[in-house]
Image (cartoon, coloured by chain):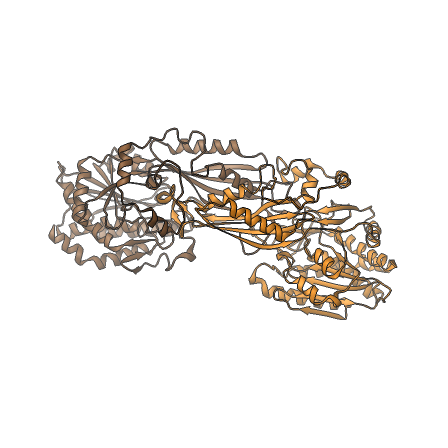
Chain colours: A orange, B brown
Amino acid sequence: MKNLIDFINSNNVRFIEELKEFLRIPSISNNPDHKPDMQSCSKWLAKHIESIGFEKVEVYNTPGHPIVYAEYMKAGKDKPTVLLYGHYDVQPVDPLELWTDPPFEPTIKDGKIFARGTTDDKGQLFIHLKSLEAYLKNNNSLPVNIKILYEGEEEIGSPNLPKFLEDNKELLKCNLVVISDTSMYTKGLPSICYGLRGLAYMQIDLVGPNKDLHSGSYGGGVDNPINALANLITKLKDEKGKILIDGFYDDVVPLSQKERDEFKRLPFNEENFKKELEIDEVFGEEGYTTTERLSARPTLDCNGIWGGFQGEGAKTVLPSKAGAKISMRLVPNQMPKKIAQLFEAYINKIAPKSVKVKVTDLHGGKPSVTPIDTPAINAAVESLKKGFGVEPVFMKEGGSIPIVNSFKEILGADTVLLGFGLPDENAHSPNEHLDLDNFHKGILSITHYFNELSKIK
Amino acid sequence: MKNLIDFINSNNVRFIEELKEFLRIPSISNNPDHKPDMQSCSKWLAKHIESIGFEKVEVYNTPGHPIVYAEYMKAGKDKPTVLLYGHYDVQPVDPLELWTDPPFEPTIKDGKIFARGTTDDKGQLFIHLKSLEAYLKNNNSLPVNIKILYEGEEEIGSPNLPKFLEDNKELLKCNLVVISDTSMYTKGLPSICYGLRGLAYMQIDLVGPNKDLHSGSYGGGVDNPINALANLITKLKDEKGKILIDGFYDDVVPLSQKERDEFKRLPFNEENFKKELEIDEVFGEEGYTTTERLSARPTLDCNGIWGGFQGEGAKTVLPSKAGAKISMRLVPNQMPKKIAQLFEAYINKIAPKSVKVKVTDLHGGKPSVTPIDTPAINAAVESLKKGFGVEPVFMKEGGSIPIVNSFKEILGADTVLLGFGLPDENAHSPNEHLDLDNFHKGILSITHYFNELSKIK
């Protein structure tokens, strides 16, 4: 291992320069204008995987954005096969004016690299690639068999990945999936994520009158779709955050006492949390602690709202249309399709006749929990201890990686989630960044991990 | 009068060509980018007034947009002095994509002229100018003394006009103000508007966390400013449209039985109203008819709302900010300043501690009612009868022309509101237009009106 660690330590600057190249490609998957960027990003990635020593690299086209696949199977049949999953697509960048530096011009400050995709997920998948490079350039071999699967549609709900898994079950056959796309609990504390919330992401569109009206001439006689939309949103949850959709909590598995005890052991400081976000009060469902609400309880949030005049000054319009994006985070055993149906049924039940309402299911992902008492997890604990010099914690994360369920259901493989991001690195927000110390220690940890995994019989 | 009527009939095409020139100037007062257009529009207007035969024309600069003033005082001291008020500024044009033709390229279809400002108010003030031109070019004189006052800030609440009136009381001294900036009740039915609603236009800005957050990582622990905003808006009025702000109705003068009887005589067809707007149900305060609610009762409408992700697809953001524009139409004796204060106090009372809320009073205007049993009104009835061949109706209008109160309070003059627009001409909406038959009959009516006014002792 020493030669590998030396290689990783002495090539750190070059690794970061290469990552910058990757980050410069504006691979925003939800915007059709960026389709060419998605193409060139997938090609760049395939070429890079070849350059570190992989012989078999393929770019698969899908009805959406391409999938990059590569494999190394020379470790031998007695060694485990590990599927490394990641995504090269990124979130949109608006509001652009809140970025201190351009989102696709990586900038290093205070030991952090700033750009869209640094922590979610280009920077994290690059940790795997640089570890693989260390093995291949120094040992001319890998200690385990590796399959690489990078998609370009994670941020839009992976619409084409399940079919790809179904169609390529044999190709993708593996003993274990490893993903780095989550966060450590806090800086200096390496973490293994054993639970992820699911997601049901909806859009509501309201139409009142068939055109924008003068609010003076029509106000008082015609329902206003913005006011009506506000009423609908208000009825989705009560003032404490309890969701009011009929049947919403029916399938929720209650938190066990053991789990609640574990939550209490996490080093969460509510005062610091409030200070960091500059809020006077936390918010959420009664009867649960903030840490429980942040990752182990379902939620409902408006992700966007629009309607009428949004410019400077005053325009006295009674608008024709208004709309909102609303998503729900789900926990075991809530199923996104069922929740989407309950949502739509509830909206249709409460909507007034004075406006027309359309509900669209934009995408969904199932919640997941992985077993934590397996050889692969024990190997991860060992490796993180070596990479960071600290005993890792087990945690649940509030976000969703729906594909984890597909790996289990379609490939029969469990997933180990080794996240090297930090919760305050602005994933999905302006000024997204990645701590470069975690990037470096991540590469070391993953390198130990491949070695530890090779020992499993 | 015959020579005047012949002149008006034979010059109609030229009048419309000149109006088109006026409409092509994008004089949007609420957008600083259009400041140069406001300047050139005021200059164009001053030059046009000179061209029809006025000797004294001035453009007054204000801290905002210029005021155009002109006068003709040669009718003699025994003749009344009539102040003609209008505004050359127009509303913004968004959503631009809903315009069939470009908003500043006037287009004639089906006897209507389409462009921003046609009915509100460039087309209507042009009716006055063309009548004055008929007198000056044919008789070389006017039957009454005329003062013209055209401002460029009506659509943003006339912030500089009251001071201009105060500073120029002597210059603007008059017996009567005449404004054409309202609508006829329906096509073919000339109307005199005797009541206008007032306005209190507010903005609410909410801040939750200090930056946009990932809704998966933070949802459930941090209040969402969009959800919080929806809750605030919902609490502003009940589901029937009754406004819940403490003290809101305290100063409302109840409708008299006589007035309610008059409302019943208006040719309002609720089925046609719904069909035209493509709504399944009308909406509003219980205990009042739709016509009453549309013009004689106070209302509250969201004019705009924004927050979070508004693009295509899904972005799982828990936004930092959200905001809304909310305006209230007022009736006698509700005062806009007091209503704005009640609004702010109520919002502060109901706002949760988990978000920061800022309320801004964007602008206001007082409601007004003018006496209808005066010689000037009787002359208007006569003139409209001659111009349209039909007995006019008396009506209240839902919109606001706050300056009507200032004319009464500062200049001591009553206002006669002779509107030649139609309620479905899309004032403030895409595809604004003006009926060219009403334009023509408007010029004839106003020409009779100046003549009738000259007979008043």
Q: Is residue A202 above or below residue B221?
A: below
Instruction: From the top left corner, tell me how far across and down residue A168 is, in percent.
Output: 71, 67
Q: Nearer the viewer, residue A36 or A194?
A: A194
Q: Is residue B427 left or right of residue A445?
A: left
Circle count = 0
Q: Quadrant of the C terminus of chain B?
A: top left
- Is B111 in front, or is B73? B111
**Residue A104, image quadrant:** bottom right
In this orientation, does residue B112 appear? yes
Residue ranking furthest to the left: B2
Q: Is residue B427 above or below residue A29?
A: above
Q: Position of residue B251 (x, y in %)?
A: 37, 29
x, y percent for residue A353: 45, 46
Q: Along the line of sight, which residue is nearer the eye, A37 or B186?
A: B186
Q: Position of residue B389 (x, y in %)?
A: 17, 49
Q: Quadrant of residue A299?
A: top right
Horizontally, residue B349 falls left or right of residue A193, namely left
- Can see residue B64? no
